[in-house]
Image (spheres, helix red, strand yellow):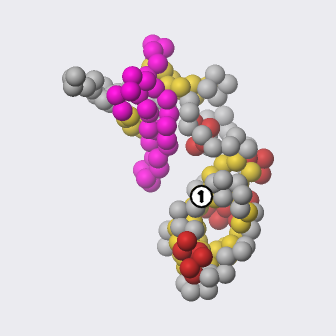
Amino acid sequence: MGSDNRICVGVITGAYGVRGEARIKSFCAEPSAIADYSPLSSENGKTQYPLTITRPVKGGFAARLGGVFTKEHADSLKGEKLYAQRRDLPSLPDDEYYYADLIGLDVLDTGGKSIGRISAVHDHGAGDILEIAAADARGSFLVPFTRDVVPTIDQTARRAIIDLPDGVMPEASDAK
């Protein structure tokens, strides 16, 4: 899990054009709000990027990043995650979560048995998917992040209760 003081709000996906603009993919509920949290920081926190959106483009925005003046520099930043300070982000209702708040939660079944830990949250457009690293080291498995499957998130206890659908957990290996 990243720093508790920062939340990943986007990623640089490469250069846009030849004048040093970068292509940005926003993870914000309102995508253009990413500019409201400027300056954004790099994953390691050592670089600050003042960000100004210049135009919407397919899959995100073209943006000017402070200190980035060439296409080559913007291209070299491809894959760089952009972080905002948690204190600058809006408070969420009780039933909404930042991905960073879910990663690392212990996962229990409805009977209280430990089944793993949330290792990632994926969003491929059709709804959020939780990746669970199995407690018995049998690999990982995916579950939809819906109220039916995940009825309880307890941030205070750092756990999620999952009503596991049949056949979701990886099978134990018979290899010796």
Decide which of 47, 115 is in the foreground and name it: 47
Is any part of residue 163 visible from this angle? no
Residue 121 colored in magenta in the image: yes
User: Vertically, is 149 above or below 69?
Assistant: above
- Residue at position x 66%, y 58% from top? 42
Q: Seen in the image, is 145 located left or right of residue 176? A: right
Residue 83 x, y percent position in the rendering: 67, 55
Given residues 71 and 100, the one toward you in this image is 71
Q: Amino acid at mark 1?
A: Lys
Residue sitting at 25 percent across and 25 percent down? Answer: 173
Q: Which residue lies at the image location 39% right of the left edge and 22% below the top edge?
A: 136
The residue pinned by badge 1 equals 81
Which segment is the magenta one? 110-139
Q: Residue furthest front?
A: 176
- Where is 171 relative to 80, above or below? above
Label 1 secondary element:
strand
